[in-house]
Image (cartoon, grey):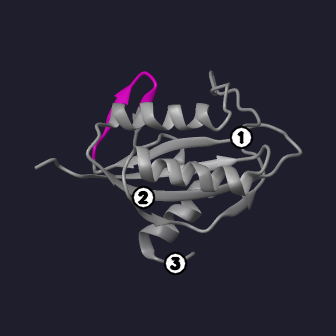
Amino acid sequence: MTKSHTVYFSLGSNLGDRRKTMDDALRLLDTRVGPLERVSSFYETDPWGFSSPHKFLNACACCTTPDSPQQVLEATQEIERHLGRSLKTSDGQYHDRPIDIDILLYDDLTVDKPGLRIPHPLMREREFVMRPLHEILTGGDR
């Protein structure tokens, strides 16, 4: 029997049809990573770490998966590419993007490898992550 892991994601979109892109990303997470267990409300937020006139839609989701953290990362990056993301954040330089999917938590695992850090190192600094994460962890908004 394959072990199932619990993974929490943060999703954000600030270009194009944000709601459709977020819905598509959630559908693809469900089919390519594992069944979605919980999804937060969508929150509209200002960009974090850069200036842009384009507001974000943000949400968090939880799914179960048999995949390893590296396999989950590869799946999320493929979903981002499929939905039109061509640039990744590097050296702390953020920019507008059709979709961003971050792995926040994977069971109680800690991973610190180039390109993959779990728990996500900046999640506690980001209200646009903590508010929807709190919602799906507790079943309500804070």
Q: Is residue 91 magenta?
A: no
Query: Which residue is at the front of the view, 19 or 92?
Result: 19
Q: Residues within 10 Å of mark 3 (few under 14, many from 20)?
A: few
Chain part drawn in magenta = 109-116
**Residue at 70%, 26% in the rendered image:** 93
Decide if residue 47 is on the left or right side of residue 135: right
Position of residue 99 relative to residue 55, above or below, is: above
Q: Is residue 126 visible?
A: no
Location of residue 65 in the rendering, given as x and y in whole percent from the top left corner: 31, 49
Give me the C-alpha separation between circle 2 and circle 1.
21 Å
Residue carrying label 2: 62
Give me the C-alpha separation between circle 2 and circle 3.
15 Å
Give me the C-alpha separation between circle 3 and circle 1.
27 Å
Tell whether label 1 touches label 2 (CB within 8 Å): no
Single out the residue that lies furthest toward the left.
1
Location of residue 28 in the rendering, given as x and y in whole percent from the top left corner: 50, 47
